[in-house]
Image: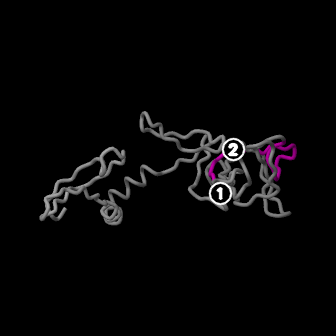
Amino acid sequence: LSQGGSVYYGELVDGDGKKVLYRIEIDATTGKETRVPIDISENIIHEINTNEKVVEKIKEKTKVVVNNETNVPTGEVINGYVVYKATAEINVNHSDGYDSELAINTYVLTKPMKYVIDEATNKGSWVENKADKFGRLLKASVLDKTGQVLFTTVTDVTTHGDNKFRFAFGVGNSYYPLVNGDYEVVFEYLGATKQQ
């Protein structure tokens, strides 16, 4: 806008339906008006790089909250499969007072989610991604009720149905016993459906 023109928003070509920011340049010789698009991407990148308030606002708007109800995509895709992160409550309950796996017939239930924006309200929300399901476990951390990490390795992962799995505590053929009680597991897994 170094030539002092006004900024407009609309179609460069009448009727094409593509609205952009533009300015009007007038040819000094012919007087013909030409709509010239304005590329603001450089200014946006400059603001992101230099304005901490903008960076904090972006972080606030894009943070992802993981909880028992929401298995959220991490933004990573491995060989075409979406990575999800979630938490779950697990229970160890064995007659010996400890065990190296979940209580009998106990499974971690997964529910892959996706973020969808309602076009009518322009508001977004998490909904179940029924096009995907649990594929395979990538990693898991088991925490006690105070949030202390007890270990970050699991073994003998088995699935039951589309979105359930269970595991033993340990690595390879070595198992870690846990006293009976409730624990939290924070885990990441691959979806089973390859993305296009």
In the rendered view, does 59 fall on the left or right side of 71?
left
**Mark 1: few, some, or many residues within 10 Å (few <14, many ≥20)?**
some
On the image, the x and y values in percent for residue 92 come to: 78, 45
Please state the extent of the stretch shown in magenta in the rendering: 84-104
**144 inside magenta stretch:** no
Which mark identifies residue 110? Answer: 2
Q: Earlier in the sequence, mark 2 or mark 1?
A: 2
Of residue 37 and residue 72, the one placed in the foreground of this image is 37
Q: Compared with residue 25, is residue 9 higher up or lower down, i.e. above or below?
A: above
Query: Which amino acid type is marked by label 2?
Result: Thr
Q: Quadrant of residue 91?
A: top right
- Write the residue at 80% across / 54% down: 157
On the image, the x and y values in percent for residue 147 come to: 61, 51
In the rendered view, does 71 fall on the left or right side of 138?
left
- Is residue 194 something one can see in this rendering? yes
Query: Which amino acid type is marked by label 1?
Result: Val
- Quickly name the residue at label 1: 149
Of residue 116 and residue 60, the one placed in the foreground of this image is 116
- Write the residue at 17% across / 65% down: 2
- Write the residue at 70% across / 46% down: 133
- Write the residue at 53% across / 44% down: 115
On the image, the x and y values in percent for residue 178 come to: 77, 52
The kind of secondary structure element at disc 1 is strand
The kind of secondary structure element at disc 2 is loop
